[in-house]
Amino acid sequence: MPKDRPTRSRWRWVLRALVLLVALAVALLVWANVSPWPSTYVIRTVFDAGGRTIARKLAPHVPKQGLAEARDVQYDATDRDAKLDIFHPQGAVPRTTIVWIHGGGHVAGKKEEIANYLRILASKGYGVVGIEYTRAPDAHYPVPVEQANRALGWLSANAPRYGLSRDRFVLAGDSAGAQIAAQLANIVTSPKYARDLSIRPSIDPARLVGAVLFCGPFDAQLTIPQDGGEPSWFIRSVMWAYMGRKDFRSDPRVAGYSVARFVTKDFPPAFISVGNDDPLQAHSYLMADQLRAQGVPVDVLFWPRDHAPALPHEYQFDLDSAEGAEALRRTEAFLAGLK
């Protein structure tokens, strides 16, 4: 009999562990059903790992000298997330200031992850600013758009102190950041759209000379099924977190999010690119078509559908590839051609 006691004790501990695991699984399922946070943690973990990889791979392409920078500059003293990084060539004030908004599905990403790419752009003769904003679900739409608008206003007032031009801005972004940049460009140039979103533009439209948009989600209708079907787990998670409503499909604000549907002839000249294996490819095609229909000058870098290797989301950050290098070259050519 004494020999059985350790065995029984072990089985009790195994049973208790199993009960605890089941309880934790049930609790997690319940939590995931009432909050976007569990899904956000998963997405953020994956995206943040990807962001670190991007930063590491871009590092060898950054010039070793000739750049000046200011990091974590506060553009709104009342907002702890309202910080930006500034990069520019040492010496003369660049003619154009590029304001870049990072991606991350609205729930992930950090300005530091693309800082090396911004340094590379700055080395081409531009002032470049990377802005931070509050990620969902810590903040909901349209808070990041409002933050980007305040950053633009702060730059308009303070750019000369940091060796930047405040008379020629280009709004730029990747992925979710491209969507925010496109919305802000439309707010600046379309009074009706600005009124509909209740956001007062922080700069005069004459100061916005261009937009650079990589891989953005510009129309919710392309990712939210209109036939009653369910969107993907990723889209459900991101839109719930960003809109702050699980029933986001009935949220009237989703219409304004779909900026491609509201562009006007006054939208600035745009450069748009996306990979041929990007799940958001249709968004860039639609954005380009809608802008062209309004008579806006549009330069695109779209790849044949059978292009090999297939180019994924955010392909432009891979400067070790011929395609990434071409995207940078075309971006430079677009910027150089702006009036």
Image: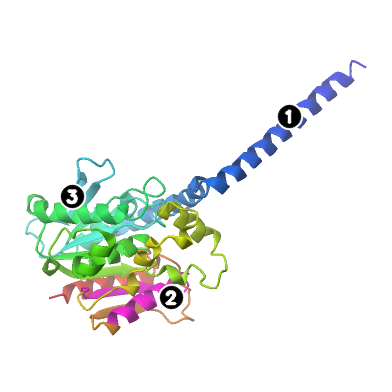
Is residue 330 among what the camera can see? no
Residue 296's spot in the image, x, y percent? 23, 80
Residue 9's spot in the image, x, y percent? 80, 22
Residue 281 among magenta residues: yes
- Find disc 3 in the rendering and name its residue: 69
Q: Quadrant of the C terminus?
A: bottom left
Quadrant location of residue 282?
A: bottom left
Q: Nearer the viewer, residue 101 or 291?
A: 291
Residue 5: give its label: none
- N-terminal label among 2 and 1: 1
Q: Nearer the viewer, residue 212 or 60?
A: 212
Is residue 261 among what the camera can see? yes
Residue 250's spot in the image, x, y percent? 46, 62
- Above or below residue 79? Residue 247 is below
Q: Nearer the viewer, residue 324 or 299?
A: 299
Q: Is residue 91 left or right of residue 201?
A: left
Q: Which residues are magenta?
A: 267-292
Q: Give the residue type that dot 1 points to.
A: Arg
Pointer 3 and pointer 2: residues touching (CB < 8 Å)? no
**How many marks overall?**
3
Residue at 27 percent of width and 40 percent of height: 80
